[in-house]
Image: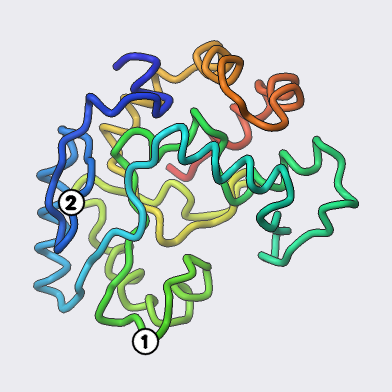
Amino acid sequence: MTAKQLTGKVSTHLVDTLFGQKSFLIHRHVTNDLLALKKAANLAGFNLNIASGFRDFERQMMIWNRKMSGQAAILDNRSQPLVFSMLTEEEKVFAILRWSALPGASRHHWGTDFDVFDRNSLPQDTSLQLEPWEYLDGHQHKLYLWLKGNLHLFGFFFPYQEDKGGVAAEPWHISHRQAAQDCMSLLDVDTLRQEIQSSSLIGQEVVLANLETIYNRYITNISL
């Protein structure tokens, strides 16, 4: 894969695939396993849907820049909004990284990772929040338990199964182990630095100064 593919600048490695009633861009080596997972989930009584799949660099940067500029909330470890005016630039960067990936380093750039949910279990007139309580003891709990017992049969795993001091636990986020591992093995600090330097990322100077730490704590630091 090229640097542009790894960092979400282009999507030429992805295939437009119908998943349920919507189409998603999925890594060509993941499509069959993901569809097989959906079929098995359906047989188990779940209506497996993707809440978020591929996100390109620009989309991830829009999320990031909204938070860095104060247009969107920056959350603490308990998912509560922090006081924006009280944060230094470095504090903003590290707080954002708990819940939102650095543009260029998101696993969602690869088409190997998906935020999933059971549409049938979603209460009427309720929007999915993608918050841990929904999966650990809320309406998505049964799906989460089923995924824990079956993901590996289709080549998937939870990269953020536990909080390892980097990205917060995400019980909705599944990843195709082999395809994602192949991508991760090619994404290094220099590749990231190059793509970030040529972007309009807010907080770029702080990010570049801390890139080695970010890489080790928030990008490669996953649950295996």
Q: Residue at x 71, y 42 (%)?
A: 68
Could you tell me which secondary element the residue under label 1 belongs to? loop
Q: Which mark is residue 21?
A: none
- Where, by quadrant of the figure, is residue 210 drawn? top right
Could you tell me which secondary element the residue under label 2 belongs to? strand
**What amino acid does circle 1 point to?**
Pro
> 13 or 151: nearer the eye?
13
Give percent across and percent down for residue 149.
28, 64
Alpha carbon of mark 2 to alpha carbon of mark 1: how far?
24 Å
Crowding at label 1, few (<14), some or many (≥20) Cα neighbours within 10 Å? few
Q: Residue at x 34, y 81 (%)?
A: 122
Position above or below: 77 against 54: below
Give percent across and percent down for residue 200.
61, 26
Q: Are marks 2 and 1 in contact (CB under 8 Å)?
A: no
Q: Which mark is residue 123?
A: 1
In this picture, residue 143 sits left or right of residue 153: right
Residue at the far right in the pictured view: 86
Give percent across and percent down for residue 129.
49, 69
- Where, by quadrant of the figure, is residue 176 drawn? top left
> 141 or 79: nearer the eye?
79
Report the quarter where the N terminus lies: top left
Give percent across and percent down for residue 57.
45, 32
In this picture, residue 80 sits left or right of residue 7: right
Q: Which mark is residue 23?
A: 2
Position above or below: 64 against 196: below
Position above or below: 194 against 92: above
Report the quarter where the C terminus lies: top left
Q: Nearer the viewer, mark 2 or mark 1?
A: 2
In this picture, residue 56 sits left or right of residue 45: right
Q: Residue at x 43, y 25 (%)?
A: 7
**What amino acid does circle 2 point to?**
Ser
In the rendered structure, which disc, 2 or 1, sits on the residue that comes first in sequence?
A: 2
